[in-house]
Image (spheres, rainbow, N blue to C red):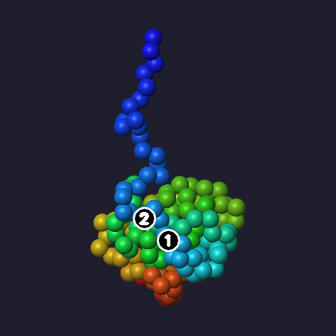
Amino acid sequence: MSQIKPRPDRLAKPSSARSPGRPEGFPRPVRDLIVARAGGVCELCGVLPVAQIHHRRPRGMGGSSDPGTNRAANGLALCSCCHDVVEGRSVEHPQLGRVRGSRAESERKGWLISRLSPDAPDEVPVWTAAGWVQLSDGGAKRRIEGRPG
């Protein structure tokens, strides 16, 4: 009995494959701005070292052609635990204990911005360990007194 071999043109693309012309993530200079803005620690818990840069407005499966996707205001420097919480997963945080993730809460706190939102990331306040802040594409953050909106 002959063995059936998959046709090369029918093989799944590797998960790292992106659409042509669409960047995979934040360019190194932008990543450096985001990590510097955070002082090297997670912008949410303010305790653990930065492990990942989170896109507040998601890129989508094939990347994004929107130039704002990989700008500093769209990025948050997070530890892996807080990144899980932002994405809606509950975790046992080494400093904060059990933290319940909720995508709805993540949107309320500006950690996630719907791709349908007309607001640019630099217009959406975000809750951080420093309180409510407005992020800029230049890598700055401006504290906002009280709860915005």
Q: Quadrant of residue 115?
A: bottom left
Residue at image position (45%, 68%) is 56
Q: Residue 124, position in %: x, y?
A: 40, 78
Q: Is residue 16 left or right of residue 92?
A: left
Q: Is residue 67 left or right of residue 80?
A: left
Residue at image position (57%, 81%) is 37
Visible residue check, residue 107 = no
Residue at image position (34%, 69%) is 66
Q: Residue 108, position in %: x, y?
A: 43, 70
Disc 2 crowd rating (10 Å Cα; few below 14, some 14-19, many 20+) is some
Q: In the rendering, which numbered label is found on residue 60?
A: none
Give the amino acid at mark 2: Pro
Q: Is residue 53 left or right of residue 56?
A: right
Secondary structure of the residue carrying numbered label 1: loop
Give the amino acid at mark 1: Pro
Nearer to me, 92 or 11: 11
Visible residue check, residue 91 = yes
Question: Up-down: is 125 above or below 2?
Answer: below
Q: In the rendering, which numbered label is found on residue 23?
A: 2
Q: In the rendering, which numbered label is found on residue 27?
A: 1
Residue at image position (45%, 11%) is 1
| Residue at the extreme top of the image, as rendered | 1
Secondary structure of the residue carrying numbered label 2: loop
Q: Residue 40, position in %: x, y?
A: 65, 75
As measured in the structure, the alpha-carbon distance from the residue carrying label 2 to the one carrying label 1 is 8 Å
Nearer to me, 51 or 86: 51
Nearer to me, 65 or 60: 65
| Residues under numbered marks 2 and 1 in contact, where contact means CB atoms less than 8 Å apart | yes
Question: Up-down: is 62 above or below 110?
Answer: above
| Residue at the extreme right of the image, as rendered | 94
Q: Residue 132, position in %: x, y?
A: 50, 81
